[in-house]
């Protein structure tokens, strides 16, 4: 029966040591990077599939970022339209007050009309200046006015005269300033209704983006889980490989020491 020393001596120590070092180096690399597959030698098919999964995940994240920007634009636009809605309510209240001619002095009527002018100017400023990251959120018309403006928020047609009016006609000197309060009230009501409908559409757009984001989040999570199982290192397995490599290394060094002693003994006998 061969002794343990003879068994070690029969092993090729350099080859055994090289194998141990390779195993330990591989285990350390996987433990440090956290990846079991980081190059083609670790598994060509897993590497190719992993890169495809990474590309798909990056694409989903890019789509999510684009939709998130759209969400911010919609939310900001809706909030601006909310301010415009409050201004329209104030304008409507002023028109109702102006309709009561007998209860107002000339100075009071002038003050209300001046306030109406200020309200319409504020709506125009909102449309011209509302921007997100430097980009205007409301479309600019060919005449330079915004879609959110006294000229474009709403129009109404007088069935008797056939004339068409906008909120701009409520300014001082306008066709609806100080007269035909019933038509002015209808016009403001239509502007408020159209503005609210635009807010509803923006709200629906935001809810759709949120729903799509939730679905995309689940999809990304599932893909990351598959990718993790595919390329991530199994720490327990890698530690076991490292310990096995250490044991193999110690055995190789012991075998090398025994072989060295035996060689020396043979040389002593040959003297």
Image: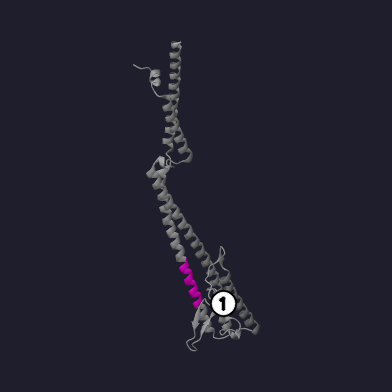
Label 1 neighbourhood size at 10 Å, few (<14), some (14-19), many (20+)? many
Q: Which residues are magenta?
A: 190-202
Assess whether residue 201 is covered by the magenta stretch. Answer: yes
Q: Which residue: 39% across, 43% down?
A: 44
State the residue lying farthest toward the front.
271
**Quadrant housing the N terminus:** top left
Q: Using the image as rendered, state which of residue 128 and residue 150 is in the foreground.
A: 128
**Foreground of the two, 47 or 80:** 47
Q: Which color scheme did the rendering employ for the protein?
A: one colour
In this rendering, does residue 226 appear at all? no
Residue 156: say if magenta.
no
Q: Position of residue 53 (x, y in %)?
A: 41, 50
Residue topped by disc 1: 91
Toward the right, the furthest residue is: 107
Q: Secondary structure at mark 1?
A: helix
Looking at this view, is 77 or 269 the one in front? 269
Count of marks placed on residues: 1
Identified at 52% across, 83% down, the residue is 165
Q: Say which quarter of the image contains residue 267.
A: top left
Q: Main secondary structure of the magenta part?
A: helix
Q: Is residue 80 above or below residue 114?
A: above
Q: Position of residue 259 (x, y in %)?
A: 43, 19
Quadrant in which residue 37 is drawn = top left
Residue drawn at x 46%, y 68% as measured from the top left: 201
Relative image position of residue 13 (x, y in whole percent): 42, 24
Task: Judge whether 77 appears above or below 230 on screen.
Answer: below
Report the front residue among 157 and 187. Answer: 157
Quarter of the image for residue 94 reads bottom right
């Amino acid at each position: 029966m061969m002794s343990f020393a003879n068994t070690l001596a029969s092993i090729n120590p350099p080859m055994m040591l090289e194998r141990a070092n390779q195993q330990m180096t591989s285990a350390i690399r996987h433990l440090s990077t956290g990846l079991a597959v980081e190059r083609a030698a670790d598994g060509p098919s897993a590497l190719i599939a992993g890169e495809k999964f990474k590309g798909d995940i990056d694409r989903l994240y890019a789509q999510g970022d684009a939709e998130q920007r759209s969400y911010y634009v919609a939310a900001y636009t809706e909030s601006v339209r909310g301010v415009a809605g409050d201004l329209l309510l104030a304008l409507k209240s002023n028109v109702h007050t102006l309709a009561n001619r007998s209860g107002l002095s000339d100075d009071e009527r002038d003050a209300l009309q001046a306030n109406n002018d200020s309200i319409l100017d504020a709506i125009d400023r909102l449309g011209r200046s509302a921007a997100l990251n430097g980009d205007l959120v409301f479309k600019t018309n060919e005449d330079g006015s915004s879609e959110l403006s006294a000229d474009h928020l709403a129009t109404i047609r007088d069935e008797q005269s056939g004339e068409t009016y906008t909120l701009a006609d409520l300014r001082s000197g306008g066709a609806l300033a100080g007269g035909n309060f019933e038509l002015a009230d209808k016009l403001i009501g239509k502007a408020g209704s159209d503005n609210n409908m635009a807010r509803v559409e923006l709200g629906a757009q935001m809810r759709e983006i949120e729903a799509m984001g939730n679905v995309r989040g689940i999809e990304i999570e599932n893909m990351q889980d598959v990718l993790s199982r595919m390329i991530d290192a199994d720490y327990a397995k890698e530690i076991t490989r490292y310990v096995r490599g250490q044991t193999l290394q110690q055995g190789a060094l012991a075998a090398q020491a025994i072989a060295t002693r035996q060689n020396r003994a043979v040389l002593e006998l040959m003297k």
